[in-house]
Image (cartoon, rainbow, N blue to C red):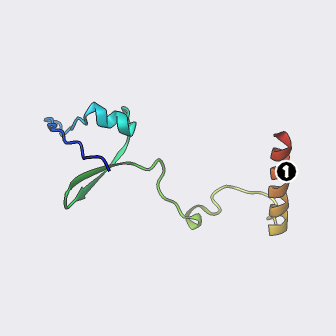
Amino acid sequence: MAATEKTITTISTKGQVILPSAIRKRKDWGAGTRLLVEDTPDGVLLKLAPAFAPTRPEDVFGVLPHSGKPKTMEEMDAAVLAEARRRDARN
């Protein structure tokens, strides 16, 4: 593991902190990158914020409208298999 890079930065009057360019480039954090800020016993931890909030299937089940008779498991399995075969035939 490489030695931790230590750099000093300053908090602006607006509470902004500038991260050194070398760190931003290494992490690929450009302008507009959303970071998760965590207060830890050792200091402040910055992590890339997830693109989407965590979701559970039960939170989103049934949110899309559907008209018609529900499909059986056999019909869904057959449709998935047919699509896989169609995509495989394309390649």
- How many numbered marks does the figure carry? 1
Q: What residue appears at the point 79 percent right and 65 percent down from the top-left corner?
A: 70
Compare residues 38 and 62 and report the one nearer the observer. Answer: 38
Above or below 67: residue 72: below
Q: What residue appears at the point 23 percent right and 52 percent down from the top-left corner?
A: 44
Mark 1 surroundings: few (<14), some (14-19) or many (≥20) residues within 10 A: few
Q: Quadrant of residue 19?
A: top left
Above or below 65: residue 86: above
Specify whether 42 is left or right of 88: left
User: What is the x, y in percent for residue 86?
Assistant: 85, 46
Q: What residue appears at the point 81 percent right and 59 percent down from the top-left corner?
A: 68
Secondary element type, mark 1? helix
Q: Quadrant of residue 77?
A: bottom right
User: What is the x, y in percent for residue 72?
Assistant: 82, 68
What quarter of the picture does the C terminus occupy? top right
Q: What residue appears at the point 17 percent right and 36 percent down from the top-left corner?
A: 14
Disc 1 target residue: 85
Q: Quadrant of residue 33?
A: top left
Specify whether 53 is left or right of 91: left
**Amino acid type at image mark 1:** Arg
Above or below 79: residue 91: above
User: What is the x, y in percent for residue 37?
Assistant: 29, 51
